[in-house]
Image (cartoon, rainbow, N blue to C red):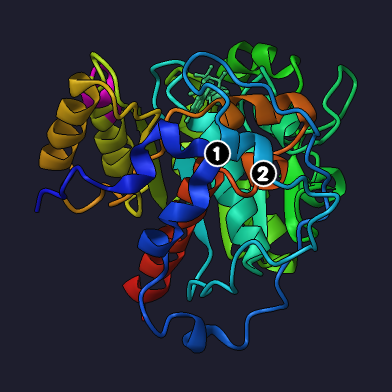
Amino acid sequence: MTEPLTDPVVAPDNEASGQADIATLAPPDGMAATVADVPVQHEVTHPVPAEASTDDLEPPTPEAQAEPEAESAPARPLIEPLPAPPDTRIMVVANQKGGVGKTTTTVNIAAALAMGGLSVLVIDLDPQGNASTALGVEHSTGTRGTYEVLLDGDAIEDLVVVSQEAPNLRVLPATVDLAAAEVELVSVVAREGRLNKALRTYLKDHPADYVFFDCPPSLGLLTLNALVAANEILIPIQCEYYALEGVSQLMQTINLVKGELNDELDLSTVLLTMFDARTKLAAQVVDEVRAHFTEQTLPMVIPRSVRISEAPSYGQTVLTYQPESTGAESYLAAAREIARRGAKENS
Ligand SMILES: Nc1ncnc2c1ncn2[C@@H]1O[C@H](COP(=O)(O)OP(=O)(O)OP(=O)(O)O)[C@@H](O)[C@H]1O
Ligand SMILES: [Mg+2]
């Protein structure tokens, strides 16, 4: 079924006054009541930088200037407790097209779920280490992380770090060394299953509700390792020209992996990112993607937002950087929907 395009979450001009959209993003009635046993909510403690810059996409408005800063605002829960899935959901965030919002989606959804009381692990599989940066985790050269797990057989539990974003959000960092792993893995025995083995061992002693792999923009051995270890795929699709370019190749790879290496794999979620409400093209892309992935596409879209793109430079997600922004609200809404679907799916 095609969703209407009038979802107010999408208007970038509303960034500064994002609260106006919250009503439309609320979880279905009664959801919060069903999750009483989930651990206590995370509260926002990061200060919001006093002067969040804007660009021509989002000119400062009087409301933006009047917006209170976090220091003076009382800390409040950013999100209500979210329902846990019956089994660990292991999600690969993949799209071999570069710059479509894989990392941004990984870190913001992971942080939102963790703030909702769920236990979350992010595995950074991109030598760029962008997910590690955005989650405020050290990943300079020499930091041990995904490379050591894949190539040296180190245990994940020895290398994960707690993110500053939420106490129950853990990260396996990636450094530039990981670029070499793509080549070095070629000659390793059972090269596609290394991560799967390490993750299964980790999860035995450290159960998690969600695991996310942030993949590089390629379908090499790193992404393949994630596809073998996962049970679900989340594809972020940018609302721009050629949005679906590459997705058919990704689908072929998924089907190959399904047939040969991992029967469990399921493309469960598609998230439309960087939506610009002012362009007809973006609306057309939304229609096209929803027609193609009717069940999988989340009803909310992520707007193009300067706040979202600024957050990583503070080592934060947009959720703690600008919790009141439309960008934060849209990722919170997407996380709610992912949690809701995950809790329902196998119950
Ligand atoms: N909703 C958004 N609004 C504005 N900018 C965004 C949004 N989402 C992502 N960006 C910015 O777009 C760029 C690409 O996003 P991101 O790094 O998440 O993509 P990616 O798919 O992980 O890229 P890569 O393929 O290089 O790993 C980044 O600079 C990011 O800050
Ligand atoms: Mg990335």
| Rendering coords of residue 106 (x, y %) | 55, 40
Residue type, numbered disc 1: Ala
* Residue at 82 percent of width and 36 percent of height: 137
Disc number for residue 16: 1
Q: Main secondary structure of the magenta part?
A: helix
Which quarter of the figure has residue 114? Answer: bottom right
Report the quarter where the C terminus lies. bottom left
Which quarter of the figure has residue 252? Answer: top left
* Residue at 88 percent of width and 27 percent of height: 143
Q: Is residue 209 above or below residue 137?
A: below
| Rendering coords of residue 217 (x, y %) | 47, 18
- The reply to whether dot 1 and dot 2 touch (C-beta < 8 Å) is yes
Residue type, numbered disc 2: Glu
Residue 249 magenta-drawn?
A: yes
Judging depth in this view, the residue of 143 and 263 nearest the camera is 143
Q: Is residue 68 above or below residue 93?
A: below
Disc number for residue 67: 2
Residue most toward the front? 62
- Any part of residue 209 in sight: yes
Secondary structure state at the residue bearing disc 1: helix
Secondary structure state at the residue bearing disc 2: loop
| Rendering coords of residue 68 (x, y %) | 73, 47
**Extent of the magenta region:** 245-250
